[in-house]
Amino acid sequence: MSEKTPQTLQNHAKMVAPFHYVLLPILLINLLLSIYRSATAFSVETAWSTSMAVALIMIALFARIFALQAQDRVIRLEERMRLQTLLPDELKPRIHDFTMDQLAALRFASDSELPNLARKVLEDGIDDRKTIKQLIVTWRADYQRL
C-alpha cells in the first residue's frame, strides 16, 4: 500500500479530476454546442437539446453540492464530539457557538493544538476558514473528504 502525501495548508484542497476536468468540461461543451445549434437553426428539437444540456449541468452541480452538504453535516457532528472530548470544561458549553466554517477549518488541527486554537477562534471571532487553517501548526489530515 502506497503512503499518502502528508497534508498541509498548501495541498489539502481536493479536486476530483474526473468530475472537474472531464465531466464538467464535457457538459459545458455540450451546452455551448446546443446553444449554437439553437441560435443557428432554431427548432423544437434544438430548444429541447439546450434545455436538456442545462438540466444535465444542474444535475451534476446539485449532485456535488448535496454530497458536500452531507459531508458538512458529518463534519459538524464529528467535530462537536471531538470538541466535547478535548476542550476544557469551561469551553464545553460553547461548542454550539462554533459556525460550520469554523468547525470545517478546526478539523485539521491536531488534538493537542485544538483546545487553544478553538479558544482563540471563539474569543477573537475568527470565522474565515482560510484564516483558521493558517493558524494551525500541526496539521491533522483528512483524506476522506469529497
Image: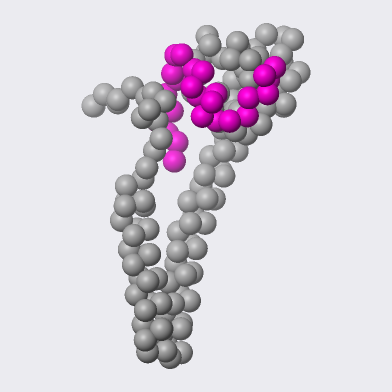
Residue 50 seen in render: yes
Query: Who is closer to the viewer here, 144 or 32?
Result: 32
Is residue 92 depicted above or below 63 in this figure?
A: above
Image coords of residue 136 (percent x, y): 49, 17
Residue 32 placement (x, y as % from top left): 37, 71
Q: Quadrant of the C terminus?
A: top left
Taking the image as shown, residue 139 lies to the left or right of residue 113, namely left
Between 116 and 123, which is closer to the camera in this rendering?
123
* Residue 29 sits in quarter: bottom left
Quarter-of-image position of residue 12: top left
What's the residue at 42%, 25% (across, down)? Answer: 9
Relative to 2, is 8 on the left or the right?
Answer: right
Task: Find residue 142 and report its horizontal and vertical position in percent.
Answer: 43, 28
- Up the image or down, 142 lies above or below 61; here it is above
139 in magenta: yes
| Quadrant position of the N terminus in the picture | top left
Residue shown at 47% from the left, 70% from the top: 54
Residue 78 visible from this viewpoint: no
Q: Is residue 62 left or right of residue 25?
A: right
In the image, is residue 98 part of the stretch drawn in magenta?
Answer: no
Note whether 52 is above or below 60 in the view shown: below
Dominant secondary structure, magenta: loop
The total of numbered circles placed on residues is 0
Occupied quadrant, residue 43: bottom left
> Where does the magenta region start and end?
122-146
Location of residue 3 with respect to 61 vertically, above or below:
above
Q: How is the image coloured?
A: one colour
Instruction: Tell me residue 81's x, y (percent).
Output: 62, 23
Residue at 53% x, 39% y: name it.
71
Residue occupying image coordinates x 44% and y 77%: 50
